[in-house]
Image: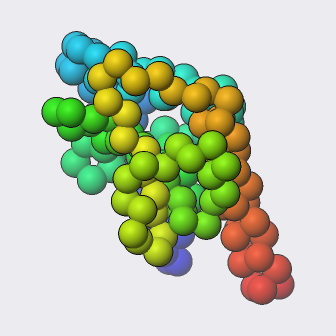
C-alpha cells in the first residue's frame, strides 16, 4: 500500500470528534479574548477559502489545509499565532507577518489582545497561500506524468 493510501485509510479509521468539533472545543475552553480571536481568524480563513479543510494536529493545534498546510492557529498566554507553513514564499505587502521572520520557510502573525486584524490583507494572504500550495501540487503532478 502506498503512503498516501495508508494515510488516507488511517484518517478514515479514527474515532472521536472531528477536527472541526475539536477546534470548537478549543475556542470554548479558552473562554477569553484568545478564543474570540481564534474564532474570528477561523471565520476569515473560511471566507477566504470556502474549500479549506480543518485538521487537528500535533496534540492540539488547529490546522487549515488546502493542497497542503495553509496555516496553524496556536494559542498562547499573550498571543494567538497564525503560522503560515510556506510564509517566506508569500508576498506580504501589508506587512502582516511580525513573527518567525528569520526562517527560510515559515512566517507567523502574532495577534495580541486588543489588536485589530486587517481582514482584507489577511484574506489575500490566505488566498496566496492556497495558490502557492495548488501550484506545487500541479508541478508535482506534471513531473509524475
Question: Foreground: 113 or 12?
Answer: 113
Locate residue 62 relative to residue 89 in the image: left or right.
Answer: left
Q: Residue furthest left?
A: 77
Instruction: Report the residue at 42% width, 62% height from top.
Output: 101
Spot occupied by residue 20 in the image (x, y as percentages of width and height): 43, 29
Visual colour scheme? rainbow
User: In which quadrant will I find the C terminus?
Assistant: bottom right
Locate residue 69 relative to residue 112 in the image: left or right.
Answer: right
Instruction: Report the residue at 43% width, 44% height from top.
Output: 109
Instruction: Report the residue at 47% width, 74% height from top.
Output: 104
Instruction: Report the residue at 71% width, 68% height from top.
Output: 137
In the image, residue 110 above or below residue 141? above
Question: Foreground: 68 or 87?
Answer: 87
Question: Foreground: 14 or 34?
Answer: 34
In the image, residue 110 above or below residue 139? above
Spot occupied by residue 11 in the image (x, y as percentages of width and height): 43, 51
Residue 25 visible within the image? no
Spot occupied by residue 43 in the image (x, y as percentages of width and height): 54, 23
Residue 82 visible within the image? yes
Amino acid at each position: 500500500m502506498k503512503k498516501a493510501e495508508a494515510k488516507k485509510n488511517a484518517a478514515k479509521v479514527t474515532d472521536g470528534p472531528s477536527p472541526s468539533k475539536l477546534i470548537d472545543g478549543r475556542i470554548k475552553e479558552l473562554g477569553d479574548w484568545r478564543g474570540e480571536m481564534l474564532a474570528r481568524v477561523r471565520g476569515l480563513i473560511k471566507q477566504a477559502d470556502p474549500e479549506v479543510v480543518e485538521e487537528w494536529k500535533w496534540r492540539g493545534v488547529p490546522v487549515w489545509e488546502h493542497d497542503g498546510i495553509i496555516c496553524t492557529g496556536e494559542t498562547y498566554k499573550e498571543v494567538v499565532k497564525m503560522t503560515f507553513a510556506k510564509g517566506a514564499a508569500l508576498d506580504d505587502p501589508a506587512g502582516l507577518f511580525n513573527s518567525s521572520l528569520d526562517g527560510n520557510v515559515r512566517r507567523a502573525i502574532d495577534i495580541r489582545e486588543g489588536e485589530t486584524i486587517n481582514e482584507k490583507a489577511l484574506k489575500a494572504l490566505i488566498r496566496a497561500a492556497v495558490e502557492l500550495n495548488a501550484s506545487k501540487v500541479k508541478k508535482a503532478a506534471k513531473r509524475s506524468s
